[in-house]
Amino acid sequence: MNQSLELISTAVDCGADFVEIGIPFSDPLADGPEIQYSSYVALKNGITLKKILKMVETIRKKSEVPLILMGYYNPVLTYGEQKFMADAINSGVDGLIVPDLSIDEAANYKQLADRNKLSTIFLVSPTSSAERIKRIDKYCSDFVYAITVTGVTGAGKVFDSNTDNYLKNLQSILKKRYVAGFGVSSAETAKRLAKYSDGIVIGSKLVALIRENKNNKQALKAVEKLLTQIRKAI
């Protein structure tokens, strides 16, 4: 937990507009090797949803940066939707991303989130039809999460003209702002996606840097360097 708190503090100092905190799960189907590894380590170390909410409380004592929890529906369902929403808002959570909960099955979830004033963020992808993108747009409270490529999370994805056209097309469909994620691994890739979106999400590359630098101090420096480069680029 202490390392997570230091990493979040570093991200905020580097100019992060919001911080996404992952909820570990044993079967993270939308995630690639790096995020899968981070979930495995977190679960092995006894990290639970309750402990994550406690960490949010700790962060809130020092920072007002928007905090978004990103996790799968099973832990939320096990915790109890209503209790989870109440505990999340009381701890200081601002928004939620549940990638395996489609809008077709999210009516109760959406109602509870709205009632608790929690922002709901749903995902669109290159395979989403214009009609579905419009429906997802309506289900999102403040902004939409645009997956840049088909497949799972992971740094080093290839962005090309198809990616550019997809993101540009979203500008003409969505009424809300949108951020682009999946595959950002450098200042160059971030700059490319930022040209056609309102924000960039980066996760797998940060986990990779932490794994590459076993020393906590070195890991923090590596994360700070990358985030600073990205912030300057966009």
Image (cartoon, helix red, strand yellow):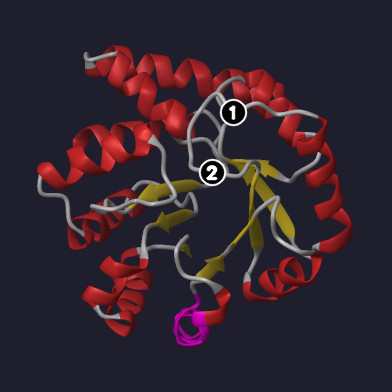
Q: Which residue is mark 2?
A: 151
x%, y% of residue 96? 46, 64
- Nearest the eye: 83 or 56: 83
Amino acid type assigned to the residue bearing label 1 in the image = Lys
Q: Quadrant of residue 100?
A: bottom left
Q: Amino acid at mark 2?
A: Gly
Would you place residue 85 above or below residue 183 in this image?
A: below
Please say if the residues under marks 2 and 1 sit with CB atoms less than 8 Å apart.
yes
The N terminus is located in which quarter?
A: top left
* Horizontal side of residue 160 vs 57, given as left or right: right
Q: Magenta region's main secondary structure?
A: helix
Give the quarter of the figure containing the C terminus: top right
> Nearer the observer, disc 2 or disc 1?
2
Element type where label 2 sits in the image: loop
Q: Give the secondary structure at mark 1.
A: loop
Residue at (85%, 45%) from the top-left corner? 168
Q: Tell me which segment is drawn in magenta.
A: 105-117
Whether residue 234 can be seen here? no
For label 1, the crowd category at 10 Å Cα-Cα, with few meaning under 14, some 14 to 19 and many 20 or more, is some
In the depicted structure, whether residue 114 falls above or below residue 140: below
Magenta span includes 90: no
Q: Mark 1 sits on what residue?
A: 157
Q: Is residue 108 visible?
A: yes
Q: Marks 2 and 1, how far apart in space?
A: 10 Å
